[in-house]
Image (cartoon, rainbow, N blue to C red):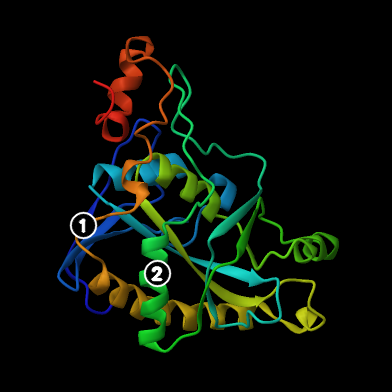
């Protein structure tokens, strides 16, 4: 990525297994950053194969406070054209086979998730899109489907009838786990094509989608660099204290092993 300096790599070990890939660490716009290829370099992992817990836990171990997710999506509305960016503020879950919480196994916590995206981070990303000159529409619903197959036309039309905006396969579990880990989370959804509801969908080729994805990725790098330069050093959002009143289990009832495993996440509240 242009502008990234002091580059190094680290492989994190977590109680939940290995993350998708080593984390790439560096400095961008004078700020320390970490990058993870969620599907692994070379795109080796299906969406349903991603170890979401290990990925987010690894970020927490590294001291990450904010995550900007960059993801390819299909558009469910005519207004979201290929090469547009959407910064959704809601998710709808259509997955079936995924673990999406750090809790259980002797500890219960219920985070608030009515607003799953950090509004402060989303605002910075939206402003950064404007500065770069890309269409970045803030707000809307991201349907998270299981995959790896794309939707049937019937499914696509149902999602449109709900008023959903874009569809992808990865971001909801990340958002849930980031909130549990008290990490701010926002998505830059890169529109590569219209979903199969669109009358022109059958004329879309894989080559066209890949070309759009590559073009979007280059623009997203500019948006991320701009966003990093604009982020305030102190967080004032509610994400930073999401667990303050969420842990229900009495501390003395939590198994010691669970306390050790979740120490980076619950250590502020449970000793």
Q: Residue at image x 61%, y 82%?
A: 82
Instruction: Determine the CA span between mark 1 and mark 2.
Output: 15 Å
Return the x and y of residue 104 as percentages of the image width and height: 48, 23
Counting from the top left corner in percent of width and height, residue 247 is at 40, 26
Q: Quadrant of residue 133?
A: bottom left
Mark 1 is surrounded, within 10 Å at the Cα level, by few (under 14), some (14 to 19) or many (20 or more) other residues, namely few
User: Which residue position holds label 1?
Assistant: 234
Residue 14, compared with residue 23, is above or below; it is: above
Q: In which quarter of the image is the N terminus?
A: bottom left
Whether residue 183 appears in this view of the structure is: no
Which residue has dot 2 on it?
123
Q: In this view, does 156 lie to the left or right of 65?
A: right
Q: Nearer the viewer, residue 71 or 38?
A: 71
Q: Nearer the viewer, residue 44 or 149?
A: 149
Image coordinates of residue 240 in percent, x first then y, are 31, 46
Report the front residue among 79 and 5: 79
Q: Which of marks 1 and 2 is nearer the N terminus?
A: 2
**Can residue 265 be seen in the rendering of this structure?**
yes
């Amino acid at each position: 990525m242009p502008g990234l300096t002091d580059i190094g790599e680290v492989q994190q070990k977590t109680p939940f297994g290995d993350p998708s890939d080593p984390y790439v660490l560096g400095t961008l716009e004078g700020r320390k950053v970490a990058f993870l290829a969620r599907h692994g370099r070379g795109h080796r992992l299906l969406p349903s194969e991603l170890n979401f817990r290990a990925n987010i836990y690894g970020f927490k171990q590294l001291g990450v406070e904010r995550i900007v997710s960059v993801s390819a999506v299909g558009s469910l509305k005519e207004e979201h054209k290929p090469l547009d960016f959407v910064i959704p503020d809601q998710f709808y879950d259509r997955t079936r086979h995924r673990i999406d919480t750090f809790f259980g196994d002797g500890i219960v916590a219920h985070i608030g998730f009515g607003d799953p995206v950090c509004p402060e981070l989303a605002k910075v990303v939206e402003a950064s899109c404007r500065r770069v000159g890309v269409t970045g529409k803030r707000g809307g619903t991201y349907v998270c489907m299981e995959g790896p197959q794309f939707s049937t036309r019937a499914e696509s039309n149902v999602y449109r009838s709900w008023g959903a905006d874009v569809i992808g396969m990865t971001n909801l579990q990340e958002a849930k786990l980031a909130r549990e880990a008290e990490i701010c989370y926002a998505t830059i959804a890169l529109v590569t094509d219209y979903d199969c509801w669109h009358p022109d969908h059958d004329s879309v080729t894989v080559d066209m989608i890949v070309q759009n994805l590559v073009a979007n990725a280059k623009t997203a790098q500019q948006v991320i660099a701009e966003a990093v330069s604009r982020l305030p050093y102190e967080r004032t959002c509610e994400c930073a204290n999401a667990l303050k009143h969420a842990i229900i289990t009495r501390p003395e009832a939590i198994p010691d092993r669970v306390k050790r495993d979740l120490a980076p996440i619950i250590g502020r509240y449970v000793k």
